[in-house]
Image (tube, rainbow, N blue to C red):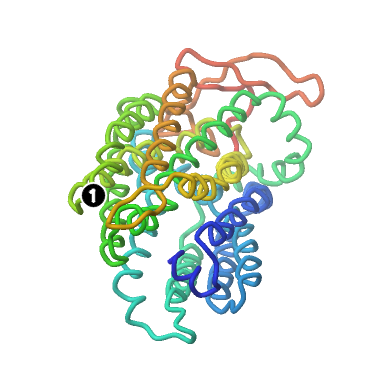
Amino acid sequence: SSTSIGERFGKDSTQVTTAITLTLLLRPVGALVGGILSDMYNRKWVLATIMVVVGALSLATGYCDTFSAFLGVRALFGVFMGGVWGPAASLSLENLPREARGLFSGIFQQGYACGYLVASCVNLGLVPSVSLSGGANYRALFFLGAGLSWLAAAIQAAVPVSRVHNSKSKSNSETKTKSKLFQHLCTILRTYYPNILLAIWLMILFAFFSHASQDLLLTMYVQSKCFSNFRATQLVIVANTGSVVGGVVGGIMSQKLGRRLTVVVCSCIAGAFIPLWVVPSSFNGVAAGGFFVQIGVQSAWAVVPIYMNELSPPNVRALFGGLAYNLGLMVASGSSQIESRAGETRMIETCGRVHEDYATVSGIFVGIIAALLIITALLAWENKGRDLNGGGHDDGQVERYVVDKVDAVDGQMTPKSSGSGVKTKVGDPEEN
């Protein structure tokens, strides 16, 4: 659709990717506000409200008649999209038993890949057949996005309040969380800064990992591999099928191997298939390469939701995960422009014409990020299996807390690693 948008507004691919950059730059704002509101109040209604606004902005995008208006609406869209991931990830995973977390973390994260897959299918089958004013058929994608966002909001509104939230309400700890959230932020920063820095760095790498392998995928297939838009969209669908498969596989692996080792193995898989992705010119060769690269990329991504939840301090899980996730996306917001500019400086001749070599640039970029992820995961730590329940209970077990030291300001305990590698604290069981 980026090509169609460029044609509609008379812009090249680099200028169109500015919309992606703006969206990602502003997402931490939404993550900060949405995370705080979610941790202070009811996550269910905060998330449902955000999705209603996201749907409205998606609908408005389809009615933009100038490129400036398009950029403005996408910027607002980015703010509200930033408030989705943190509350959604914590709400989806905090009620699960330990043994199911890995699998459902992968399923949750591949909602992204499934959305990409649905959009690709719509772009292939529906967009060419619809008739919209000015020939702007791409608007059908934004209209579909609006409908799906509102459907998600309706489903969220119908889902019962989580067990963790009920436990929190019964113990009257919600009021305590509201009154102390802001004064505890400095204590949390001081106490958990290693986890915070690790989470942000990991999310920067993961954001580059996915964007480098996906943002210019359709453009790469059309311009560097000389496929028609129809055939290129088919290749994108094949690649995103690999993403969905990878999410399930990676989630299961992380429950068996641990979060870090899964990232290492899956990053190696992605790197190993880069040559098959960028070198072939045949449809089958490119399809196979794209499929297996996306299996590697998205199986590594499968651990992210539960890894962020398990690294997070208590009481601020939506804020911690959402802000780290979106800060990573913000830093990586220039990924598509970097690739686009780099591709324009490297020209190749195929299909009887000279054009940008986006394939080689994307392959090099993905390979570098895969190597950095492997190194980081090997040097990092994890809290696999930690208690995420508001009342401190999980499957009838009460987590053991270990005394470290009392903060001189407000008497809060700082975390200490137990023998299992889980960071714990003394006092009341972990709140949500």
Residue 122 against residue 302 in the figure, above or below: below
Q: What residue is drawn where x is 52% and y is 48%?
A: 341
Quadrant in which residue 229 is drawn: bottom left
User: Which of the image's four quarters has the N terminus?
Assistant: bottom left
Mark 1: few/some/many CA within 10 Å (<14, 14-19, 20+): some
| The C terminus lies in quadrant | top right
In the displayed structure, would residue 386 be above or below residue 223? above
Residue 432 in view, yes or no: no
Residue at screen point 66% across, 46% down: 174
Viewer-proximal residue, 172 or 176? 176
Residue tagged by mark 1? 281
Q: Is residue 158 visible?
A: yes
In the image, farthest residue toward the right: 409
**Residue 161 relative to residue 280: left or right:** right
- Where is residue 114 shown, x and y percent of the image? 35, 56
Measured from the top left, where is residue 23 in percent x and y?
A: 59, 57
Q: In this view, does 104 lie above or below 72?
A: above
- Counting from the top left corner in percent of width and height, residue 333 is at 57, 47
Q: Which of 349 and 95 is in front in this view?
A: 349
The amino acid type found where label 1 is placed reads Ser
Residue under the image location 54 percent in, 72 percent down: 10
In the depicted structure, whether residue 90 falls above or below residue 368: below
Q: Nearer the viewer, residue 284 or 32?
A: 284
Q: Quadrant of residue 195?
A: top right
**Residue at x 41% of width, y 47% of height:** 347
Q: Is mark 1 on a helix, strand or loop?
A: loop
